[in-house]
Image (cartoon, rainbow, N blue to C red):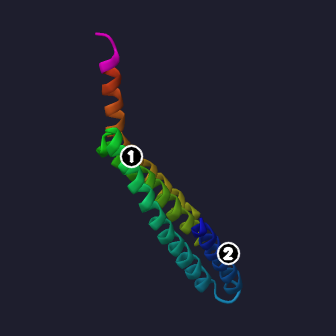
Amino acid sequence: MDIIFKIIGIGLITCIAALILKPVRSDFAMIVTMVGGIIIMVMIMSSLSSALNIITTIANKTGVNTSLLSIVFKIVGIGYLTEFAASMCADAGSSGLGDKVLLGGKIVILAMSLPIITNILSIVMELLPS
């Protein structure tokens, strides 16, 4: 629970520092914003890894196909990273590039979800009477 306070603290300190630096050196303000965002992402990743370990343990105990579960985790990760990168582009004043990053992430997610869709369709076809 204390990690959220650290994340909020780093976010607020980064914002204040960027606001102070922006009138003086806008290029430094952008760098401070990006570094703050990267620090927050690193903190999130450490929390995420423990959650993934717990979910993997549950999947192993229940017999869920771990390869499909792995694809779901990758899709979620791509979604979060894509959103983070697009936000960083917007912070840098290039929202058009951020939109293209989001589009790229959506296309990659679609391509990665095809094995899951195929698996679901095969299960449905097995359930249907011949």
- Residue sitting at x 53%, y 78%: 35
The residue pinned by badge 2 equals 12
Q: Quadrant of the N terminus?
A: bottom right
- Residue at 36% across, 50% down: 57
**Where on the picture, by quarter, is residue 19?**
bottom right
Left or right: where 75 falls relative to 98: left
Question: Of all residues shown, which one is farthest toward the top?
Answer: 130
Q: CA distance from mark 2 to mark 1?
A: 36 Å
| Amino acid on which the number 1 mark rests in the picture | Ile
Q: Position of residue 45 (x, y in %)?
A: 45, 65
Is residue 25 positioned above or below 14 on the image? Answer: below
Counting from the top left corner in percent of width and height, residue 88 is at 55, 68
The amino acid beneath tag 2 is Leu
Coordinates of residue 95 in the picture (x, y in percent): 58, 63
First of labels 2, 1 by sequence position: 2
Look at 41% across and 53% down and name the residue there.
54
> Does residue 130 appear in this view?
yes
**Picture disc at residue 97:** none
Give the secondary structure at mark 1: helix
Instruction: Please say whether residue 108 is visible from this viewpoint.
Output: no
Residue bounds of the magenta highlight: 126-130
Q: Is residue 109 left or right of residue 25?
A: left
**Main secondary-structure element of the magenta-colored stretch:** loop
**53 in relation to 7, above or below:** above
Which is more foreground, mark 2 or mark 1? 1
Q: Write down the residue under mark 1.
A: 58
**Residue 99 in the figure: left or right of residue 116:** right
Which residue is nearer to you in this view: 17 or 70? 70
